[in-house]
């Protein structure tokens, strides 16, 4: 009887030792890795084993998650470092009209100079009224057709502009930023954002609004297409007149473009920063900061808008609806005023 009890006791001890050894064998690589990286964690695990309160699930989960976390972090660091070495080439294109050239001039004199190339797009023909280049010293592309100047033709103007850019500049630039002549873009922050993105994969970015089943980037806040996106759009749709009907033409230009790109499986991605603060803004700085939100933004924006400091990422990229006067003020505040380090 006592023998059997003893044997049971021994068996129990044996089982326990075998269990412990097997466990050690199983978790040995993890322990080793964890020891290498996280001394405190490995001590914690050793202690747990000694005090015989083994919770395998916890140990495994903890070790795995810390290893995975480390791997993810190292991947992120590696990518960021890699991509940070590279300065993306940005082409900015800005649809405007003959009547608004003075506005375009302010855009040129403030932010647009900071793009690698800026092209203002007019619907008319070049020959009609030659411009005085001393007064308007910026690049203008004429994409033909007076009737394109009407607002309801903006979709057609945008598609033709994209075809024009595709034919001429597809190989020379990594990103194609569309902005309006009342959009203010902080190009340095756009560069900062794009350095972490790959231009050789499809995708485009902006302030996301929603209509029915479709997310689209607010045209006013500006949106930026990767080179691969324009390549695919140009070669698979814009270059083929019979395919153009894949793009809707009965809505605003930004919505139509989103439908068009969705037909070739390209979808817009949001541009909020890691604190979930917006970088592209479809209204003016004042409106965002003071929370004077329009009905459009209240009902259509993908995320709830915040006012005050949370309105805008510290690395904000754009504001929209800016008058030439506001642009000049904003520009001066951003680039001229310095904070003395005392
Ligand atoms: C262009 O504008 C400048 C500055 O106003 C003026 O001096 C020049 O004569 C103009 N040139 C032509 C060809 O009109
Ligand atoms: C895109 O570019 C990156 C960085 O230059 C490169 O590592 C990657 O292989 C490229 N991807 C494709 C799909 O070409
Ligand atoms: C934004 O910048 C301000 C001033 O430098 C700083 O106090 C704040 O913490 C920053 N916000 C975030 C979310 O990084």
Image: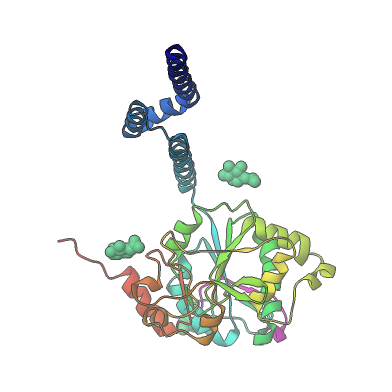
Nearest to the observer: residue 43 or residue 322? 43
Q: Which residue is drawn at 58% across and 55% down?
A: 174
Nearest to the observer: residue 133 or residue 21? 21
Up/down of 120 relative to 240, above or below = below
Up/down of 239 relative to 219, above or below = above
Up/down of 188 relative to 60, above or below = below
Can residue 162 be seen here? The reply is yes
Up/down of 81 relative to 250, above or below = above
Instruction: Give left or right: position of 289 versus 114.
Output: left
Q: Which residue lies furthest to the right in this view?
A: 242
Question: Magenta segment, which residues?
Answer: 135-148
Q: Residue furthest top?
A: 3
- Display colour scheme: rainbow
How many numbered markers are drawn? 0
Any magenta on residue 165? no
* Image quarter (top left, top right, bottom left or bottom right) of the N terminus: top left
Q: Which residue lies furthest to the left in this view?
A: 342
Q: Where is residue 43 in the image (x, y as percent from the top left)?
A: 32, 30
Nearest to the observer: residue 144 or residue 190? 190
Q: Residue at x 60, y 75 (%)?
A: 210
Q: Quadrant of residue 140?
A: bottom right
Q: Where is residue 101 in the image (x, y as percent from the top left)?
A: 53, 82
Q: Position of residue 332 (x, y in %)?
A: 33, 74
Any magenta on residue 147? yes
Can residue 92 be seen here? The reply is no
* Image quarter (top left, top right, bottom left or bottom right) of the C terminus: bottom left
Q: Position of residue 313 (x, y in %)?
A: 40, 66
Q: Quadrant of ligand 2?
A: top right
Q: Which residue is drawn at 47% across and 17% down?
A: 11
Instruction: Give left or right: position of 303 versus 155.
Output: left
């Amino acid at each position: 009887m006592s023998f059997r009890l003893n044997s049971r006791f021994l068996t129990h001890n044996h089982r326990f030792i075998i269990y412990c050894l097997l466990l050690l064998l199983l978790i040995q690589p993890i322990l080793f890795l964890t020891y290498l990286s996280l001394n405190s964690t490995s001590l914690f695990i050793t202690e747990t084993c000694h005090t015989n309160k083994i919770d395998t699930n916890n140990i495994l989960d903890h070790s795995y998650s810390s290893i995975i976390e480390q791997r993810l972090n190292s991947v992120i660091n590696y990518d960021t470092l890699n991509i940070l070495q590279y300065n993306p080439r940005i082409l900015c294109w800005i649809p405007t009209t003959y009547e608004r050239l003075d506005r375009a001039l302010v855009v040129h004199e403030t932010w647009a100079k900071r793009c690698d190339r800026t092209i203002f797009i007019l619907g008319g023909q070049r020959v009609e009224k030659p411009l005085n280049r001393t007064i308007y010293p910026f690049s203008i592309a004429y994409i033909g057709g007076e009737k394109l100047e009407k607002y309801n033709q903006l979709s057609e103007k945008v598609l033709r502009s994209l075809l024009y850019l595709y034919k001429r500049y597809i190989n020379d630039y990594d990103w194609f930023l569309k902005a309006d002549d009342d959009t203010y873009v902080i190009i340095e922050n756009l560069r900062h954002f794009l350095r972490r993105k790959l231009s050789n994969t499809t995708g485009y970015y902006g302030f996301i609004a929603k209509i029915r089943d479709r997310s689209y980037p607010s045209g006013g806040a500006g949106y930026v297409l990767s080179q691969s996106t324009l390549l695919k759009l140009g070669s698979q749709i814009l270059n083929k007149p019979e395919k153009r009907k894949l793009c809707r033409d009965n809505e605003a230009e930004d919505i139509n473009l989103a439908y068009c790109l969705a037909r070739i499986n390209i979808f817009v991605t949001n541009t909020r920063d890691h604190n979930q603060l917006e970088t592209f803004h479809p209204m003016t700085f004042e409106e965002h900061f003071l929370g004077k939100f329009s009905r459009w933004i209240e009902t259509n924006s993908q995320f709830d808008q915040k006012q005050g400091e949370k309105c805008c990422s510290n690395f904000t990229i754009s504001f929209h609806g800016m008058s030439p006067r506001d642009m000049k003020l904003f520009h001066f505040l951003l680039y001229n005023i310095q904070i003395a380090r005392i």
